[in-house]
Amino acid sequence: MRVLLIGAGGVGTAFARIAARRGFADLVIADYDVARAQRAAAASDRYLAVQVDVRDEAAIASLLAEHKADALMNAADPRFVLPQFRAALQAGVTYLDMAMSLSHPHQDAPYSLTGVKLGDEQFAMAGAWADKGALALVGIGVEPGLSDVFARHAADNLFTEIDEIGVRDGANLVVHGYDFAPTFSIWTTIEECLNPPVIWEADRGWFTTEPFSEPEVFTFPAGIGPVECVNVEHEEVLLIPRWVSSRRVTFKYGLGEEFIGVLKTVHKLGLDATTPVTVGGHQVSPRDVVAACLPDPANLGAAMSGLTCAGTWVTGTGTHGGPREVYLYHVVDNAWSMAEYGSQAVVWQTAVNPVVALELLDSGAWSGAGVLGPEALPPGPFLDLLTEYGSPWACEERSPK
């Protein structure tokens, strides 16, 4: 399989390092900064580095044709989803991403009604993908991605009826030597945390609430312990209800009081804005300035310690006929991911899942056409192969409330 990997940041580089050990794929790694692509391509002599402007749909289509790519793996920021998505559709190649096309809040009632939802612009083209017999597998990182696979596994194997599917993300990671250093893209973090969170309920459909709403303390496994989690906009809430039956779907993130405070200040100052402003005769985006002032998450691994946990909490009626509550989860220790791959835990945990997905597509264990989420495909092969990669998942039984 020949894969055009677009984006050689932390996640893209981790993707290249993980795929290098599996041997099923040759990568053409494309980035605006060709030196960064070359560093990622150093993971294997089967890799080639090239330059691309991810905003240029025609240039992406040209690369797909020139290198006879079978798949396009999008590891760039979600603001660059659509040029890649359209180029892959034009070429008729498989497309994968880890974050979907951006949302736009409802103009009149942003904290109760949805506007343009995450992924709406991609699902609007689902018919064209199906007509071509091509697959766009969207949201196949860790969250969304593995969390969606967990939801499908729970529905297929653990429950006869589901009350709530709640994705819960928490960590005890510490970045030493920095007052404030996000472990993932601050651009994406601002986008998902300050937009109105979406909730899905069977009798109401999709609706929104205020950022950081409905705080709850969730106890994470592996010694991470209790963490306060809040509602955050995330793709799982838009994906899971399309394929998995449940009364409610939510996403909550363990951000912490300090992190939430910083994000609120960024918003108050208008520094979350993406519309350029004029500074000294130059046009700059305030959010891009914030990102430029913070350390690159890809380079923080040596200063980090602790664990990150991604998982899906499910309640309902179990296959035994009584109430059941489980938490299906995946934990990565930063010390392990750095020692094994030279990639910090958060980016490695995100990157491993699309590598698994591509290997399943290459082998034929997964297949499909149209625009599909991970929960549309059988979970067993994915979970088995993830364990084979040396990064096992687990299911924790909890006492139903």
Image (cartoon, rainbow, N blue to C red):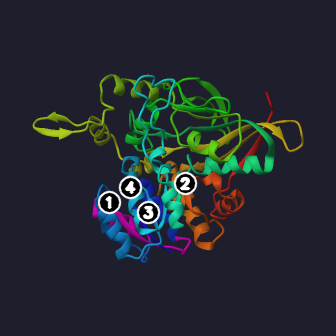
Q: Residue 249 location in percent, x, y? A: 64, 36
Q: Tell me the number on the disc at residue 57.
A: 1
> To which residue does mark 4 refer?
9
CA distance for labels 1 and 3: 11 Å
Q: Judge whether 360 appears above or below 254 on screen.
A: below
Residue 340 visible: no
Relative depth, front residue between 392 and 264: 264
Whether residue 75 is situated above or below residue 106 in the rendered picture: below
User: Residue 89 — which label?
Assistant: 3
Give amino acid for label 2.
Ile
Front residue of 261/177: it is 261
Nearest the camera: 182 or 303? 182
Of labels 4 and 2, the one closer to you: 2
Which mark is on residue 140? Answer: 2
- Return the residue nearer the eye: 159 or 346: 159
The amino acid marked with disc number 1 is Glu
Left or right of 197 in this view: 37? left
Relative vertical location of residue 162 with respect to residue 376 in this rendering, above or below: above
Q: Is residue 53 visible?
A: yes
Describe the element under mark 2 as helix, strand or loop.
loop
Q: Amino acid at mark 3?
A: Leu
**Residue range (magenta):** 21-43
Q: Local crowd at mark 4 within 10 Å, few (<14), some, or many (≥20)?
A: many
User: With 155 as the anchor, is 224 left or right in this view?
Assistant: left
Report the mark closest to the observer, 4 or 1. 1
